[in-house]
Image: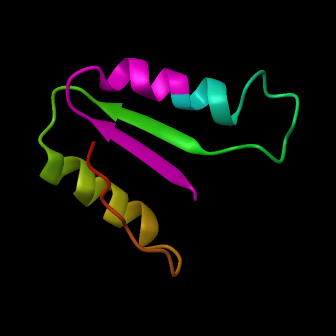
């Protein structure tokens, strides 16, 4: 996983929690993921950003709704 983009109510806090869980204090350089939060954007815009991000490789975008 290279990118986690979070959309909707509370997305800024959720992004911070993901950073804390995955990256922690940053001392383990093997634990890295790019995160982004989109509190005032429609889901379609965040998906478009993720698709552009994934276009550089053979990755795909997967939408997970909670």
Q: Residue at (49%, 73%) from the top-left corner?
A: 56
Q: Residue at (73%, 25%) from the top-left corner?
A: 24
Image quarter where the N terminus lies is bottom right
* Residue 57 horizontal/vertical position (percent): 53, 77
Magenta residues, as a range?
A: 1-17
From what the image shows, is residue 51 above or below residue 17? below
**Looking at this rendering, what residue extends furthest in the bottom direction?**
58
From what the image shows, is residue 16 above or below residue 57? above
In reply to whether residue 3 is colored magenta, the answer given is: yes
* Residue 5 horizontal/vertical position (percent): 38, 44
Colour scheme of this structure image? rainbow
Q: Residue at (62%, 45%) from the top-left corner?
A: 33
From what the image shows, is residue 50 above or below residue 36? below
Q: Residue at (78%, 21%) from the top-left corner?
A: 25
Q: 44 or 17: nearer the eye?
A: 17
From what the image shows, is residue 54 above or below residue 63? below
Image quarter where the C terminus lies is top left
Q: How many labels does the image show?
A: 0
* Residue 19 horizontal/vertical position (percent): 59, 29
* Residue 39 horizontal/vertical position (percent): 23, 26
Q: 6 or 41: nearer the eye?
A: 6
In reply to whether residue 13 is colored magenta, the answer given is: yes
């Amino acid at each position: 996983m290279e990118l986690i983009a979070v959309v909707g109510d509370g997305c800024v806090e959720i992004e911070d929690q993901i950073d804390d869980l995955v990256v922690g204090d940053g001392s383990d350089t093997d634990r890295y993921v790019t995160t982004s939060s989109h509190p005032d954007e429609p889901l379609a815009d965040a998906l478009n950003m993720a698709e552009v991000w994934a276009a550089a490789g053979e990755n795909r975008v997967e939408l997970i709704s909670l």
